[in-house]
Image (cartoon, rainbow, N blue to C red):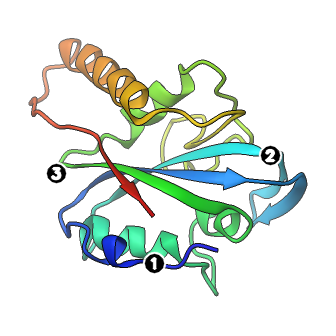
Amino acid sequence: MGRPNDKTLMMTTEPGTYALVLACQRNGSVRIGRRGTLKLQPGVYLYVGSAFGPGGLSARIKHHSQIATRPHWHIDYLRAVCDLAEVWFTTSAARHEHAWAKAVAQMEGATIPMAGFGSSDCACESHLYRFGAKQSVRAFGQRVKTTVSMMRATSAGPTSEWMVGSHIA
């Protein structure tokens, strides 16, 4: 489950926002640190995060492509029982994870399997969503762009162009 491959190791070291597309094949449960127990159901889990530390996206995706021996983030616990199918990302010095989480929450079929997952440091309800079927990169990218554009129109902050890229783990 989830070994890094050459493509993962060659990903950019720039900072950015990413979404992990995880495949779950079984019913069950997994303890998510102090947050509690997450009931698993077959389907696709989508986790939204950001990579602004040393090594940027490359370091963070390499971490998530492996099973953590000492889990640090909520997602580390889930990765132990789900396969990493894809990574969707954008490079940017701006944080887009909250806009992405909002966009994913609005997608048809999205459910929140555990409130507060990956979002204990922000006001988002969750950064983890579950779908019964895999979402397309194109549909996800369009939804994110629309959401971020609407957020920019209502704020006085700087704007920058960005694209969603896909990476098969």
Q: Earlier in the sequence, mark 1 or mark 3?
A: 1
**x, y (%) of residue 135?**
53, 33
Q: Amino acid at mark 3?
A: Ala
Q: Which dot, 1 or 3, sits closer to the camera?
A: 1
Q: Earlier in the sequence, mark 1 or mark 2?
A: 1
Is there a contact, CB below 8 Å, between mark 1 and mark 2?
Answer: no
**x, y (%) of residue 4?**
45, 78
Q: Nearer the viewer, residue 15 or 154?
A: 15
Q: Secondary structure at mark 3?
A: loop
Instruction: Pick the quarter of the image with the N terminus.
Output: bottom right
Residue drawn 81% across the image and 57% down it: 36
Q: Residues within 10 Å of mark 1 (few under 14, many from 20)?
A: some
The residue identified by callout 3 is 93
Q: Which mark is residue 42?
A: 2
Q: CA distance from mark 3 to mark 2?
A: 35 Å
The residue identified by callout 1 is 4
Residue drawn 41% across the image and 25% down it: 139
With 166 as the anchor, is 73 left or right in this view? right
Q: Amino acid at mark 1?
A: Pro
Instruction: Pick the quarter of the image with the C terminus.
Output: bottom left
Q: Earlier in the sequence, mark 3 or mark 2?
A: 2
**x, y (%) of residue 17?**
32, 50
Q: Secondary structure at mark 2?
A: loop
Q: CA distance from mark 1 to mark 3?
A: 25 Å
Q: CA distance from mark 1 to mark 2?
A: 23 Å
